[in-house]
Amino acid sequence: MIGKAVIKRFMALFEDGGAARRGGGSYDPEAYQLAAAALLVEAAQMDDTFDERERGKILDLVTTRFGLRREEGESLIDAAEDAVARSIQLHGFTRTIKSAFDHEERVELLEMLWEVAYVDGKLHDYEANLIRRITGLLQISDRESGSARKRALQRLNRPGP
């Protein structure tokens, strides 16, 4: 279960340049799950609303992607909301993702971000801007981002822009 201790470890990632690791030199899976969820929450909040559709979409995405039970996914989203409220920049989240996810996984996360942005039926300018910034920070090409966007829209059964 994600809790305050995980948030503290995650915040330590920002302070020590991403070196917070669990024993044996491997990355703490809770930290990168929290980083991914925080980016999804940040995208959902960009239009000044974080409604049940967006929260439900994020819950579906994180439980599926990380193999979590529903309660664990809900705890992860709560912790992500707290982390977003405490954070002043995206770099800590994206640095954690870059160090723990391979390129394909980063593209998959971007696709998840597009799904969250479009789940309410419209793309707000702030959401689009955030995803463009995250695309660059995750070192994903514009072409790959466009393809991820199309796949997300297809999954949501929405026409392209």
Image (cartoon, grey):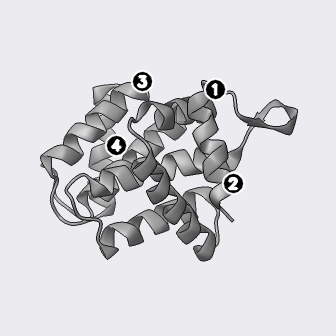
Eye-nearest disc, 4 or 2: 2
Q: Is residue 94 left or right of residue 63?
A: left
Disc 4 or 2, which lies upstream in sequence?
Answer: 2
Q: Is residue 29 left or right of residue 84?
A: right
Query: Element under label 1?
Result: loop
Query: Element under label 2?
Result: helix
* Label 3 crowd (10 A; few <14 / some 14-19 / many >=20): some
Disc 3 or 1, which lies upstream in sequence?
Answer: 1
Residue 20 sits above or below residue 50 on the image: above
Q: Closer to the camera, 37 or 141?
A: 37
Q: Which mark is residue 139?
A: 3
Say what amino acid the circle numbered 3 marks: Gln
User: Answer yes or no: do the residues labelled 4 and 2 have beta carbons within 8 Å?
Assistant: no
Residue 65 sits above or below residue 150 on the image: below
At 86% from the left edge and 38% from the top edge, which residue is drawn? 23
Q: Which mark is residue 5?
A: 2
- The residue identified by callout 4 is 148
The residues bearing labels 3 and 1 have C-alpha atoms spaced at a distance of 22 Å
At 45% from the left edge and 48% from the top edge, which residue is drawn? 86
Disc 1 or 2, which lies upstream in sequence?
Answer: 2
- The residue identified by callout 1 is 16
Residue 45 sits above or below residue 149 on the image: below
